[in-house]
Amino acid sequence: MKAFFKDMDAASIVRALEAAMVGRRLGEITRITLENGRIRATLSKLGTSTLTFTAQARPDGTEVHLVEEKLALTHRPLRNEVKDKFVRLVEKAGGVVTGPL
């Protein structure tokens, strides 16, 4: 998955994603962090799954690329559903998905 966030840096993206999750069930089970220039989404319910993204600054914003996913056995059957929800979250946070899941 690739996404682009106009006029935002990696820290701003994390804050926007966190704000987009407030009041949603996804927000209760997901933690988003910025570590060593990578954005990591950790989902914890009946196992722990992580999606790790690189963040590349561009003059007009930041592009993020999914570089690693570790899915708990219990989450694997829901892989597409989880990614679809994450796409909607990215869009709510002001990002535009630019590449395939």
Image (tube, helix red, strand yellow):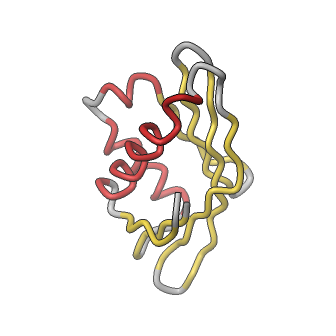
Q: Position of residue 79 (x, y in %)?
A: 53, 37
* Location of residue 8 (image quadrant): bottom left
* Location of residue 42 (image quadrant): top right
Q: Is 100 displayed left or right of 7 in the figure?
A: right
Q: Is 77 displayed left or right of 48 in the figure?
A: left
Q: Is 64 displayed left or right of 83 in the figure?
A: right
In the picture as drawn, the residue positioned furthest to the bottom comes out as 59
Q: Is residue 76 above or below residue 33?
A: above
Q: Residue at x 33, y 50 (%)?
A: 88
In the picture as drawn, the residue positioned furthest to the right comes out as 36
In the picture as drawn, the residue positioned furthest to the top comes out as 46
Q: Position of residue 16 (x, y in %)?
A: 38, 52
Q: Is residue 73 above or below residue 59?
A: above
Give the tally of numbered discs.
Answer: 0
Q: Position of residue 4 (x, y in %)?
A: 46, 71
Q: Residue at x 41, y 48 (%)?
A: 17
Q: Residue at x 63, y 36 (%)?
A: 50
Q: Position of residue 35 (x, y in %)?
A: 69, 47
Q: Nearer the viewer, residue 12 or 83?
A: 83
Q: Residue at x 55, y 60 (%)?
A: 1
* Location of residue 48 (image quadrant): top right
Q: Is 44 displayed left or right of 93 in the figure?
A: right
In the picture as drawn, the residue positioned furthest to the left comes out as 23
